Image: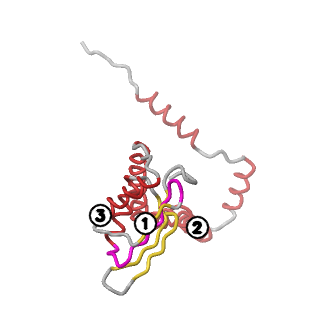
Amino acid sequence: MKISRPSTQPSTVSALSARFARLKPRVPERWRERFDAFWNARNPREQAILGGGAVLLVLVFGYLLLWEPAADGRARLNRNLPQMRADLAEMETLAHEARGLAASPAPTLRGDALTQALQDSMGQHGLKPTRLAPTGDNAVQLQLDKVPFGAVAGWLQDVRAQQRLKVVDARIAYVGATALVNVTATLQGPGSGGRN
């Protein structure tokens, strides 16, 4: 006894042909008639030349519209990607630093207490100020002579993180010895004329 299975082949073929018919561009009948008349009026040699020219034209347009812009964009992206990654890393570092500063409360040192805290901080970095004077409720002007630039940069970074002071004015002059500078700066804390 043979069991016959229903054939799905014809329905699959008709479904595929229906899909392809939808993808086929719809050309108005009048245009098709004009093209057929034009094409049939040509001899086989002319038809071969026109067909080859059409293929060449399609290849040129395909290259100019698809391949070349993609290749140029990829080359530009490969050139710019390292700089974009460096910018992203810098932004992430700055965002992390900003979150840390926002999370830490700003110290409320003012006047002589601020001056003393700055002197202690400079002492930890091996710096001795020539002049250190408060210029307002939460601002200090300082002068350092013949100090290592690296120590000044490290100290300013610590003061910014710990005391939440920012440099509002600075003059740094190279004094001729290896990495020694004279520094005149004004530091300003939160609440004295702007946010940090």
Q: Is residue 172 left or right of residue 55?
A: left
Q: In the rendered view, would you say 108 is above or below 65?
A: above
Choose between 106 and 20: the one closer to the eye. 106
Residue 123, disc: 3
**Disc 1 residue type (three-letter):** Leu
**Residue 17, horizontal then vertical, whole percent:** 51, 37
**Disc 2 residue type (three-letter):** Leu
Q: What element carries label 3?
A: helix
| Mark 1 or mark 3, earlier in chain | 3
**Residue 135, horizontal then vertical, whole percent:** 52, 61
Q: Which residue is drawn at 43% across and 66% down?
A: 132
**Disc 3 residue type (three-letter):** Gly
| Mark 2 or mark 1, earlier in chain | 2
What crowding class fits label 1: few (fewer than 14 Cα within 10 Å), some (14-19), or many (20 or more)?
some
**Residue extent of the magenta highlight:** 136-149
Q: Distance between the residues labelled 1 and 3?
A: 13 Å
**Residue 174, horizontal then vertical, whole percent:** 40, 82
**Residue 115, horizontal then vertical, whole percent:** 41, 58
- Marks 2 and 3: which is nearer the front? 3
Q: In this view, does 34 lie to the left or right of 139?
A: right
Q: Is mark 1 on a helix, strand or loop?
A: strand
Q: Name, please, the residue furthest toward the front.
A: 112
Choose between 5 and 161: the one closer to the eye. 161
Main secondary structure type of the part rendered in magenta:
strand
Q: How far apart are marks 2 and 1 (CA)?
A: 78 Å
Residue 132, disc: 1
Q: Name, please, the residue furthest toward the top.
A: 1
Task: Please say if the residues under marks 2 and 1 sit with CB atoms less than 8 Å apart.
Answer: no
What crowding class fits label 2: few (fewer than 14 Cα within 10 Å), some (14-19), or many (20 or more)?
few
The residue that disc 2 covers is 57
